[in-house]
Amino acid sequence: QVQLVESGGGLVQAGGSLRVSCAASGRTFSRYAMGWFRQAPGKEREFVAAISTSGRNTAYADSVKGRFTISRDNAKNTVYLQMNSLKPEDTAVYYCAADFTDDDYPRSHSPEYLYWGQGTQVTVSS
């Protein structure tokens, strides 16, 4: 079992940057595929980015490709989402998620993830 705690959210102007982090408990972080999802008010939760256990493989939603970068530091049990060129439509609660696995593939669908954090609010003003 793993516990996930997001941090780094906040208020930023359009065009700005923000990095959110997700710290995981436990000693087997390197065996978890990790993902970021977001949910805006009145909308369904949507996939943002995912990274495989080794960090070599990543996946992104079309809406964030070229602007967001997911990375992980297995020594620090932490996954990051660097968000650049932010837009007001990026405003949402951002959640990280984890799936224990033996493979090295990213996962882009929320049902594939068993563990979820509480979320961190990201607000982009126009």
Image (cartoon, helix red, strand yellow):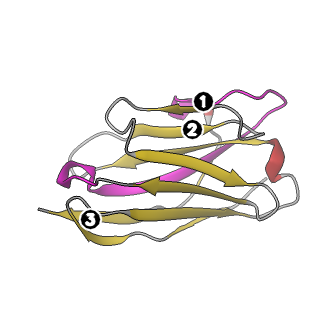
Q: Secondary structure at mark 2?
A: strand
Q: Position of residue 9 (x, y in %)?
A: 41, 69
Instruction: From the viewer's perspective, tell me whether residue 35 is left or right of residue 76.
Output: left
Q: Which residue is mark 1?
A: 107
Q: Going from the N terminus, do you reach mark 1 or mark 3 first?
A: 1
Q: Mark 2, residues whose alpha carbon is within 10 Å: few (<14), some, or many (≥20)? A: many
**Which residue is depicted at the point 77% across and 65% down?**
76
Under mark 3, the amino acid is Thr
Under mark 2, the amino acid is Ala
* Separation of residues labelled 2 and 3 (CA atoms): 21 Å
Q: Is residue 107 above or below residue 55?
A: above
Q: Please provide the residue range marked out in magenta.
A: 86-111
Q: Which residue is mark 3?
A: 123
Q: Is residue 111 above or below residue 11?
A: above
**Which residue is depicted at the point 47% across and 71% down?**
8
Under mark 1, the amino acid is Arg
Quarter holding the C terminus is bottom left
Instruction: From the viewer's perspective, tell me whether residue 4 is left or right of residue 94.
Output: right
Task: Say which mark, if any, is on residue 50.
Answer: 2
